[in-house]
Amino acid sequence: MDMQGRTHIELQELLGLRHYVQHIELFSTPLQRSTLLGLHRSRLRGRGMDFDQVRAYQIGDDSRSIDWRVTARTGEVHTKVFHEERERPTFIVAEQSLHLFFASTGCFKSVLVAQVASIFAWASLQHNDRVGGLVFDDNGVTHTPAHRSQHSVLHFIQALADANQRLQQTMSQDLKNPLIEALQQALRLTRTGSLIILICNERHLNDESSHLLRRLAAQAELILLPVSDPLEHCLPTIGPARFALADSSTSIDTHNPRLRQQWQEKGAAYQAAWQNLAQQLGAALLPLSTQFGALEQLQAINLQQVLGTQAGS
């Protein structure tokens, strides 16, 4: 991959990811149990009804649902049973802030987020769900209302590409945690019963963002995808090193054993915090790393196993 592909991603590349959805089992076909959260029948899609089964007639059943063919064949009155057609609007909250404009290996975290968010958007549309979301950066939030249409997905992906292309190392500003505003917006914009897919910087989790995620979990299903880089969890021994962000920089001695231990402990603390929160919320936790490609990581996902483990804990 060239340097442009590592640091930024074009709209055309995000559009092309739709061709890979069939190779990633994020959602099952309608005839199978959903691989992505076995909860798809827990939300309504209006007044539509799908045929479920035929069983013996019981007092109180609607006589209009009697299956006369089966009744004539068996000599016993049978009725058709229907279940309500379900909907789970998918709302993708994806970060494109300067916090993600970094990687020690592979593509930048911002590129990885854009790729994963696009794949989830295409997969949701293919699964016939309404798709929308928020793209947030250091300057605010771009909202795409959820609709069951390719136009909605294209609008969301365009917002991703635009925000990604705006990122540049020379940006000079007092960086804050942009996740807070994004979650506040999500609380206002998402409807009860939505599926919220959050793809953000691993280090944005704090008391305030945790509180907002708890509020979201009370009204929606959550999939949490915190993004990190290997360097954030293990400091390589390379001697004196200088780190720069916008107009500020700092130098450290990577040979310092105490510094290396503190560095590793801080990374592990963020991982543990996400794990604890996901367990408390009953949410799927799928950490992402710049060490691996987006397709490789999504192909390795087994959400049923993740959710089953959390349910039994």
Image: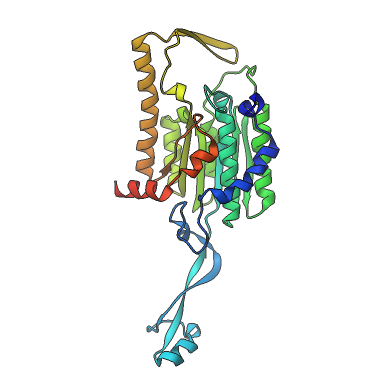
When the figure is inspected, residue 105 is found, relative to residue 130, above or below; the finding is above
Q: Report the residue at 53% width, 51% height from top.
A: 191
Residue 234 on image: x %, y % = 41, 21
At 51% across and 46% down in the image, what residue appears?
A: 196
Where is 148 relative to 291, above or below? below
The location of residue 16, given as percent across then percent down, is: 66, 43
Closer to us: 188 or 26: 26
Residue situated in front as seen by the camera: 255 or 201: 255
Q: Residue at x 47, y 61 (%)?
A: 32
Q: Position of residue 55 (x, y in %)?
A: 40, 80
Q: Is residue 306 left or right of residue 115?
A: left
Q: Nearer the viewer, residue 238 or 270?
A: 238
Above or below residue 187? Residue 208 is above
Q: Residue at 46% of width from left, 40% of height from top?
A: 224
The quadrant of the rendering that contains the N terminus is top right
Name of the residue lying farthest toward the left? 313
**Residue sitting nearer the eye, 4 or 71:** 4
